[in-house]
Image (cartoon, rainbow, N blue to C red):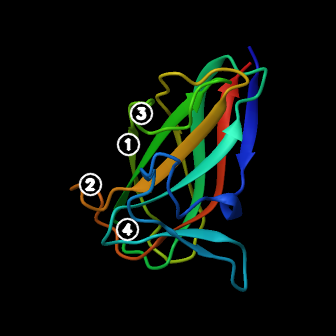
């Protein structure tokens, strides 16, 4: 069994919009910053926000997915952030509709942030997937859960890189 890595570019995040049935996968969108340095996806400290990415699951995918987030903090006081990842996938011939298929069981994970703003930190977590399979159309949703008691860090979480690892 080998492990492969799927790079999911921060700047390709979908942060607005709705599905064909009028439902939205994003309640409160994260922000995007393509300013002077590198791209960053910004998750606020006071509102649950999310972003989605779409991709085709690689044909060599067999399971055991995990996500790797590289992030910085706009300000940091060594408290915790609480992030959530969910996936969903559809086979050819199935509708892209929120009324037909829901997201997988969410995977929540907390991390103590660096004590100084702007320092890169990394979170890796195995994720739950109910129906992710090779060659399917997939959606990955990443959210910050500020309303949970586990998220106590001030300032934006700045996602700098996102990858998904999986078994082949």
**Earlier-in-chain disc, 4 versus 3:** 4
Residue at x 62% of width, y 70% of height: 40
Disc nearest the viewer among 3 and 2: 3
Local crowd size for mark 1, using a 10 Å CA cut-off: few (<14), some (14–19), many (≥20): some
**Residue underneath mark 1:** 108
Q: In this orientation, which residue lies closer to the viewer: 93 or 108?
A: 93
Which residue does the image show at 74% across and 18% down from the upper left?
A: 168
Q: Nearer the viewer, mark 1 or mark 2?
A: 1
Residue closest to the eye, 148 or 138: 138
Q: Residue at x 65, y 39 (%)?
A: 164
Instruction: Answer with mark 4 or mark 1, whichever residue precedes in sequence.
Output: 4
Q: Residues within 10 Å of mark 2 (few under 14, many from 20)?
A: some
| Marker disc for residue 102 | 3
Give the farthest residue toward the bottom.
Answer: 36
- Check residue 78 in the rendering and tell me which mark sits there, or answer none: 4
Q: Are marks 4 and 1 in contact (CB under 8 Å)?
A: no
Label 2 sits on residue = 150
| Crowd around label 3: few <14 · some 14–19 · many ≥20 (10 Å) | some
Residue 12, horizontal then vertical, whole percent: 69, 59
The picture places residue 102, in percent across and down from the top left corner, at 42, 33
Dot 3 or dot 1, earlier in sequence: 3
Nearest to the eye among marks 4 and 1: give it.
1
Quadrant position of the N terminus in the picture: top right
Tag 1 and tag 2, C-beta contact below 8 Å: yes
**Image location of residue 59, percent across then percent down:** 78, 22
């Amino acid at each position: 069994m080998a492990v492969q890595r799927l790079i999911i570019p921060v700047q390709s995040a979908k942060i607005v919009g709705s599905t064909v049935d009028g439902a939205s996968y994003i309640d409160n969108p994260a922000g995007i910053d393509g300013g002077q340095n590198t791209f960053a996806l910004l998750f606020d400290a006071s509102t649950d926000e999310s972003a989605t990415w779409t991709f085709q699951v690689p044909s060599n995918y067999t399971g055991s997915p995990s996500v790797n987030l590289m992030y910085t903090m706009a300000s940091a006081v060594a408290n915790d952030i609480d992030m959530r990842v969910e996936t969903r996938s559809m086979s050819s011939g199935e509708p892209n509709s929120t009324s037909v298929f829901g997201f997988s069981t969410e995977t929540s994970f907390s991390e103590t942030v660096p004590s100084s703003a702007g320092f890169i930190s990394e979170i890796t977590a195995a994720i739950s997937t109910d129906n992710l399979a090779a060659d399917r159309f997939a959606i990955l949703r990443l959210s910050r859960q500020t309303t949970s008691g586990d998220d106590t860090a001030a300032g934006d979480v700045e996602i700098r890189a996102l990858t998904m690892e999986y078994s082949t």
